[in-house]
Image (cartoon, helix red, strand yellow):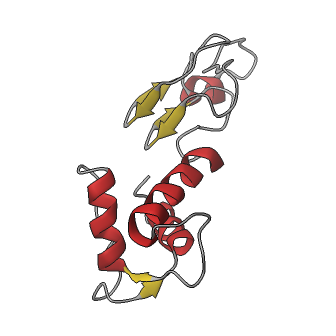
Amino acid sequence: MVAGVQGNVFRRNAFHGNPPVQVAVDHPAGSSFDIKNLADDGKNLFEDNLCLTSVNAPCPAVTVRSTALLESALQYAACGSYPPLPSCQLNVNGWNWYMLGIDPGAAVLVIGDGLQIMTVRQYVRARRDAGLF
């Protein structure tokens, strides 16, 4: 992306560098280009993307920014407040319900019987750890 690009949501895409990581490993002397984001940080949203890069560049799939945006949306929807408060806790089933309200295509988080109580940050971290981003 060129500098100045803003207001876009990149969700559930596969980004492939040039060349992909397998080529760079087999031919490390070769010069290559990779995925390049020159836009200002936080001006575009990256969620649930898969990146295959040639120089082991970080994938913007789960950035602090996109995680913070999800936390704030869930916190506000469920608790009516932001920033996240430890006192606002729901069970996994409750957080999943709010998550589906924000993104109807989201996969639900399955932990035990769904009655485990957690904060929004714990829920988002558990989703990330389960590979749901």
Name the outermost residue toward the right.
29
Percent position of residue 13, x then y = 39, 31
Q: Left or right: where does residue 27 sit relative to residue 133?
A: right
Image coords of residue 73 (percent x, y): 46, 55
Please tell me which residue lies in front, 41 or 48: 41
Residue 4 lies, in percent from the top left, at 65, 12
Residue at image point 72% right, 23% down: 28
Residue 31, image quadrant: top right
Residue shown at the point (57%, 63%) measured from the top left: 82
In the orientation shown, which residue stands out farthest toward the left? 104
Left or right: 133 as drawn, with respect to 85: left
Residue 2 placed where, x, y %?
63, 10
| Quarter of the figure that contains the N terminus | top right
In this rendering, would 29 be left or right of 50?
right
Numbered-mark total: 0
Q: Residue at x 43, y 44 (%)?
A: 48
Q: Viewed as shown, does residue 25 lie left or right of 116?
A: right
